[in-house]
Image (spheres, grey):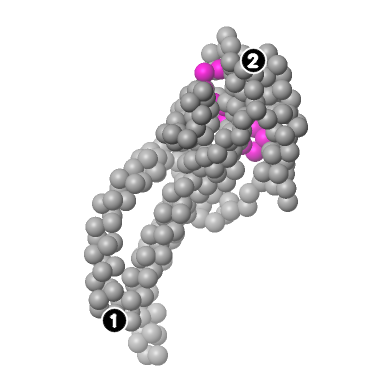
């Protein structure tokens, strides 16, 4: 008891600052990874580190040695696995507007998310009209991951979700039509965005790069994507790396309502 009390009394201001900074960095890292496949790896790493600390305290020498060797070698592999996320995190820290953006987000002040329902009808109606005119389109709708790194590859719009605006973005002569439009919180955040292309060999060879990009973004994040084929006018959607083709507007509406508007 005396040892614990003595350790508490030695707790310094710099120790509190150290804890706060670590918490802040972990929170920002979590924000960057949430909604992506990398978040599972992140939690796995945390579990291994916690287990390693526990076996150290219990003085389980053999298991501690094995876990210690795994962690020391594993960090090299992690740099390779998390290369895109590490790059994005460093870019975030180096952004001149980073401090201003954190004023209302510092630590856990912005954990509450918006409960606004997605305006599904607007998206479905726009897709139905584009399908009728055979206007190619790729719409990505964000969930927990804000898709910031993909939105940054395109042109920021930040406009209220609007049927005519969606159609204008993907109009064949529009400079914004080539790429994806990203929607989050009922706003068209960006257009002409570049997405990762899926390398899944099981995807129908008749589907082009637009469909492969739609699948690719859902493999890496928890977003869903909606595609209108320029060649056939068919509507498709993708979720978790799986594409569902040739859907009717009513089927698309049911899918989006289930994904975004179910309490």
Image side of residue 74 versus residue 168, left or right: left
Q: Which residues are magenta?
A: 177-189
Vertically, is 105 above or below 252? Answer: below
**Closest to the observer, 200 or 50:** 200
Secondary structure mostly seen in the magenta stretch: strand
Q: Which residue is mark 1?
A: 59
- The residue depicted at 69 percent of the width and 39 percent of the height is 255
Q: Residues within 10 Å of mark 1 (few under 14, many from 20)?
A: few
Does residue 46 belong to the magenta stretch? Answer: no
Residue 13 visible in the picture? no
Vertically, is 255 above or below 156? Answer: below
Where is residue 5 drawn, in percent x and y? 40, 85
- Tally of numbered discs: 2
**Closest to the observer, 18 or 233:** 233
| Picture disc at residue 212 | none
Question: SS of the residue at dot 2?
Answer: loop
Where is residue 103 drawn, in percent x and y? 52, 47
| Picture disc at residue 134 | 2
Image side of residue 212 versus residue 167, left or right: left
**Closest to the observer, 27 or 153:** 153
Where is residue 113 drawn, in percent x and y? 63, 49
Quadrant, the N terminus: bottom left
Q: Residues within 10 Å of mark 2 (few under 14, many from 20)?
A: some
Report which quarter residue 98 is drawn in.
top left
């Amino acid at each position: 008891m005396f040892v614990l009390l003595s350790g508490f009394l030695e707790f310094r201001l710099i120790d509190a600052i150290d804890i706060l900074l670590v918490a802040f960095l972990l929170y920002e890292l979590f924000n960057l990874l949430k909604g992506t496949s990398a978040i599972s790896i992140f939690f796995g790493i945390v579990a291994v580190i916690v287990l390693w600390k526990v076996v150290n305290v219990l003085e389980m020498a053999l298991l501690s040695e094995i876990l210690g060797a795994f962690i020391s070698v594993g960090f090299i592999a992690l740099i390779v696995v998390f290369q895109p996320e590490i790059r994005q995190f460093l870019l975030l820290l180096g952004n001149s507007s980073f401090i201003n953006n954190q004023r209302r987000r510092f630590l856990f002040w912005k954990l509450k998310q918006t409960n606004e329902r997605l305006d599904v009808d607007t998206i479905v109606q726009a897709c139905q009209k584009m399908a009728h005119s055979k206007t190619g389109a790729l719409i990505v709708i964000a969930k927990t991951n804000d898709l910031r790194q993909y939105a940054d590859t395109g042109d920021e719009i930040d406009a209220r979700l609007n049927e005519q605006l969606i159609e204008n973005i993907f109009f064949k002569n529009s400079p914004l039509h080539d790429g994806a439009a990203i929607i989050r919180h009922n706003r068209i955040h960006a257009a002409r965005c570049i997405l990762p292309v899926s390398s899944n060999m099981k995807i129908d060879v008749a589907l082009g790069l637009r469909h492969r990009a739609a699948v690719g973004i859902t493999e890496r994040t928890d977003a869903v994507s909606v595609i209108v084929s320029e060649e056939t006018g068919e509507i498709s959607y993708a979720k978790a790396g799986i594409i569902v083709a040739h859907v009717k507007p009513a089927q698309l509406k049911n899918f989006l309502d289930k994904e975004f508007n179910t309490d």
